[in-house]
Image (cartoon, rainbow, N blue to C red):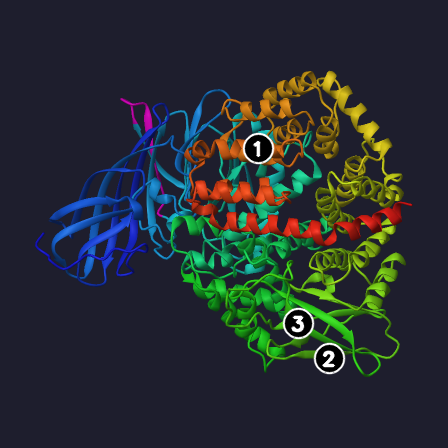
Amino acid sequence: MANSHKIKISERLSLLVRPSHYKLLLNPDLKTGLFQGNVKIDVNFKDKKNFLSLHTKFLDINDVKVYKDVTEINVAKFLEIKSLEQLLILFDNDLSPGNYLLCIKFNGNLTRNIVGFYLSHLKNNSTMVASKFQPTYARQAFPCFDEPEFKATYDITLVKPVDYIALSNMNEISKHLDTSTNTEAVTFATSVPMSTYLACFVICNFDYKEVEILANGIGNNFKLRSFAQKDQTHRIDFAQDIGKRVTEFYIKYYEVPFPLPKLDMIAIPDYVSGATEHWGLITYRETSFLIDEATASSRNKISVANTVAHELAHMWFGNLVTMKWWDEVWLNEGFASYMQVKALNAIEPSWTMLDQFLTRTLHSVLVTDAKLSSHPIVQTVETPDQITAIFDSISYNKGASVLRMLEGFVGEENFRLGVSDYLKKYEFGNTITKDLLSSLEPYFKKNNPQLRLMYIMDTWTRQMGYPLLTVTPGDKTNTYVITQKRFLIDPEAVVNDESDYKYRWFVPITYTTSSGPKENILWFPDNFDSVTLTLAEGEKWLKINNNQVGYYRVNYTDSMWQDLTEQLQSQTEQLTISDRSNLLDDAFALAEAQVIPYRVALNLSTYLRVENDFVPWETATSIFASLSTRLLNTPAHDDLQKYVQHLVKPLYTKQTWERTSLSVIEGLLRTRILSLSTKYQLPDAEEKVRNIFLKWLNLPKEVTIEPDLRDFIYYYGMKAASQDEWDKLWTIYLEEDDAQEQAKLRSALSAPRDVNILKRYMELAWDEKYVRSQDYLNVLSSISSNPSGTDLVWKNVRDNWPQLVERFTLNSRYLGSLIPSITGTFNTEISLKEMETFFAQYPEAGAGESSRVRALENVRNNIKWTNTHQSDVSAWLKEQVK
């Protein structure tokens, strides 16, 4: 090489070489599972360089040419640097700044995995090709600058069999038939500038339905098409209807036209995640998209509606405006996770999605974020493993919760105006958290001239965890003093992570009293020791954090908890559905963290006998599930069962087991109550379930169980199953083609108490013929959540770890999160030792690094719970059951 100076290559690509346009041709062979491609990339050098690098992975690079105008530049050599997933191209001399054309020929394999560009198998032995690029898998389909900031336009051509269709981000503009191979090359319109992870290619022989999206003057009307396998098109209507109404909501909400000429959605049989927001062509797992009115439950519908609304929110927030780098992925995911709730609340208000936000999004992340193994919303990530691992509950759930709190104190309309300004200002660009907050700041300043939005939000996004507010009566009548400190589940946890904000937060406080909720916000700055709240004359009790919009927990004095418990028991109008759910959730978390005695939380739960709403019962269900796990194999477990039966009985007697026409939310409540009664072995419910189940199992063609009740009737019906009954259900599963129904059956197959049955299921599930790879880890997780299956799965995973890694790779965050899922109930020093030994044996964790840390912390907390709380809880239950 002529140049002697050293070439420095890093994990991140140089910003001095930027792509502006890709011309890409991909030619996959659906029979051999191989593909060929060539790409021409227009790049601009901002500086003198004697090399350039871009991303590639698992591709064979056959030929690299570089041109300046029409002149070919001599390439000294090109090589792949596997550890960095980069293709390095070296030149004899420095290239001066300017525009160049990079031409690369390559080929690859479609059968490695279900990320990148891959082959998906259909029931009838036919195949299709799909792509999944987010976050770092576009480089497995074509050499590219695979970082979100390198936005470029695309001209895409896909070669397909004549009887198939090809889909991409843009509309098709031409077709070219090659009679010798019986294929057609389909070319699509030039795309808008976009990040590599949003490109998408699908080749299939599906059918579609279409509907017009009305833009109401904000841009043009356009078509929304929804694709599925030919025999599945009757299952498209639900998602398509939600898709139409949600898209129209977003256009109006953002006041920004949909940026593309068309929008497609498609259900893909092999899909690693729930769905991905590829621009103009959203790809879904079948269970996240297809709904059969005859078999789908209300829960299935709400789940599909949430996924569709989430992905569509990204068409603007994420796609039109994209985070600069993955450390800000919460901008994409937190935002879409919150917008999906706003959109569904607007189009289906009766579903009460704003209340369901607590049980679906907020409560679980408050648990995760109260541990040392959490991380800040904005954190540094570099490698593909770190990047995929950050797609976690902190980015999604905490991100959404913190935005909901922000909207709560900025105001709904101000929030909307700020978001709209942000999208218009940065369209087709890349942003950081500060850019969003700067767009919201002027609207916040109107009412809060002396406060800085940026600083307030930094205390929530740049440090992990959240505060516990403690309320005590002040010296004067009707005054209360509020203090804050970081809330941790383990009070003895030793904090090693420094925070610039010293684990103090700038907290917006809202409250309700006997005379109703107060609109004004009391601010508690991070540098104040306390703030004082003064109630009006005659206002009786106090509940802080209206509807749990604030991302924090609250503790009161013993007598204030007593007052709140009495208010709950008297069914006061002043405590909303969300307030009631909030009090349950806070009380049990505070008891676990030794902030209040368990009896205070347990006494509060006695009010459930008069609770008639779904969301508080949903909260109670997870509280009791956790207690039930902790008390398993102790005498107190029976007392807990009797206690839950006692609470649920008044509502149970009002439910019917026959199908009736209920609203969605009433349907959810009914299912929740009937399944809770069955789980806690209310004799009447147990008997009903077993009878309904066996009638159906013996005559599945003649007896139908209504969709809302199937998942738990299948599951509890199988608890006492014999091998013969299991075989019957397995046969039904193998013949089923509805993805929602298959999921319910797979779950039921993991229910038996008989270990030998579970062992056999685990062996069968490993075979792709029976269970797709995308579902296998869920099956393991499901078997392990059955107490009879926990040890079985734990042993299996330790014995077969190398095979699991080979199949799913260490870059799979789903493989990573299997570990906390299996070990979640462990509560002995022996189990802890086993985990430590296993991690030492396989130190490479890839994207599962943080999952391991979380798993160990969970088990240590479980051990602590048994030592600290078991006797108190057992004594209270014993007393109660008397």
Mark identifier at residue 793: 1
Task: Give the amino acid type for the residue marked by disc 3 in the picture.
Answer: Gln
- On screen, residue 267 versus residue 574, left or right, reads left
Image position of 243 (left or right of 436): right
Identify the image quadrant of the C terminus: top right
Q: Is residue 268 above or below residue 563?
A: above
User: In terms of secondary structure, where does tag 1 sit?
Assistant: helix
Image quadrant of residue 778? top right
Q: Neighbour class for label 3 at 10 Å: few (<14), some, many (≥20)? A: many
- 10 Å neighbourhood of mark 2: few (<14), some, or many (≥20)? some
Q: Residue at x 75, y 30 (%)?
A: 706
Residue 279 in view (yes/no)? no
- Determine which of the numbered discs, if any, sits on residue 366 in the image: none
Return the residue at label 2: 532
The reply to whether discs 2 and 3 touch (Cβ–Cβ < 8 Å) is: no
Helix, strand or loop status at disc 3: strand
- Viewer-proximal residue among 386 and 296: 386
- Viewer-nearest residue: 704 or 85: 85
Q: Which mark is residue 484?
A: 3
Q: Amino acid at mark 1?
A: Val
Of the two numbered discs 1 and 3 on the same chain, state the one appearing first in sequence: 3
Based on the picture, tell me whether residue 326 belongs to the magenta stretch.
no
Mark-to-mark CA distance, 1 and 3: 42 Å
Mark closer to the observer (2, 3): 3
Of the residues tagged 1 and 3, which is closer to the observer?
Answer: 1
Q: Residue furthest left?
A: 2
Question: Residue 811: horizontal and vertical position, in percent?
Answer: 42, 43
Bounds of the magenta span?
A: 178-190
Mark 2 or mark 3: whose residue is earlier in sequence? 3
Q: Residue at x 88, y 40 (%)?
A: 654
Q: Where does the image place residue 277, in percent across and percent down from the top left? A: 49, 47
Across and down, in percent, residue 880 comes to 88, 49
